[in-house]
Amino acid sequence: MSYEKVKRIGQVEIAVNDNVIEMAGVRDFNPDQIFDCGQCFRWEKDHKSWLGIAGARVARVSYDSDGKLLRIEQLGSNEPSQDRLSDVAFWWNYFDLDRDYEKIKAYLSEGDPVMKEASNFGSGIRILRQDFWEALISFIISQNNNIPRIKKCINSLAEALGEKVAELEDGSLWYSLPNPEVLARATEEELSACKLGYRSKYLIEAAKQYIRWTEERDMNAQWYVTRFDEASKLEAFCGVGPKVANCVGLFGLGLIDSFPIDVWIRRIMNEFYGIPEKDLKGMKAYAAEHFAPYGGIAQQYLFYRKLVDKSGK
DNA sequence: GCCCAGGAGAAGG
DNA sequence: CCTTCTCATGGG
């Protein structure tokens, strides 16, 4: 098995062989925590690795903590890019490998034993840099919904309106999420099979807004980066309120100080920091004062801590 | 059968 | 500005 050494970035050595990318020396990385902390909905554990899809890329991801070796195998008939470096660049960005989480954990933990415990517990969490549009529709679907059902909704939406991007050896088919044009033209009847409930019309309207605003920006490929330079501006989308806006900002725009407050964070902040559960402004202020500029990362440590607690262990 | 879920929009105070 | 009601679906 000959791996072609591609490059070295900081402490990370990157090698590529056909569909497999190996990155040695990746720190602060735990796939179980990354994929199971509620930030993404299209990755499932399969034996000791994780199988999932981001954009049109289906992949199997595993990590060996002894060698700090991250292994990414791109799967399916979607031929890997001719330029291997673009695949490397995609995953490097997706897993937020430029960010020094060790430094951030130390910063957040200083003088905060709760955060120290939580960030140690979820020390391998990373904020995935997801596609903006995918994050937008995923978290519109997430509202007033539970994680297992969110996953079902998103997968059935992909099967119904997305494009087939891969067929694996076991015969399983993988579909991308529908793009804005397809979703904008869909009807609520078409979406009824996806069991999205009242969220169907939010998605369709949000897709129309996305297209309208894209055209206003003269088709600039990433117009949204400048338009939504803070999470609250995302509330202009139909179906996006304060909580979803912060999730989309955090996971889809890299607005790392976004602090999504959902029912669990309300309970956590009450339990750990003594803030009344209904005092959302107080929680927002507390996060701004103590967690900035890494509110979103702090939030994930707290959320994951509670999530594991809850699932009974 | 019941309560709830990574809430938001609309209506009413 | 804030509070309350409604929304569709199914996981636990």
Image (cartoon, coloured by chain):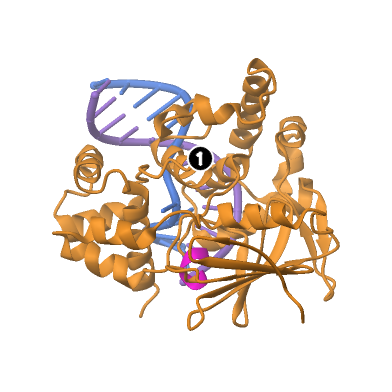
Chain colours: A orange, B blue, C purple
Looking at the picture, how far across and down is residue A11, in whole percent? 48, 66
Residue occupying image coordinates x 47% and y 59%: A38
Disc 1 marks which amino acid? Leu
Label 1 neighbour load within 10 Å: few <14, some 14-19, many 20+: many
Image quarter for residue A298? bottom left
Q: Nearer the viewer, residue A284 or A157?
A: A284
What residue is disc 1 on? A253
Magenta range is: A31-36
Residue occupying image coordinates x 25% and y 48%: A291
Looking at the picture, how far across and down is residue A69, in whole percent? 55, 75
Principal SS element in the magenta part?
Answer: helix
Depicted A37 relative to depicted B8: above or below:
below
Question: The N terminus of chain A lies in which quarter of the figure?
Answer: bottom right
Residue occupying image coordinates x 49% and y 60%: A10
Looking at the picture, how far across and down is residue B5, in whole percent? 43, 56
Residue occupying image coordinates x 18% and y 60%: A272
Looking at the picture, how far across and down is residue A195, in whole percent? 65, 50
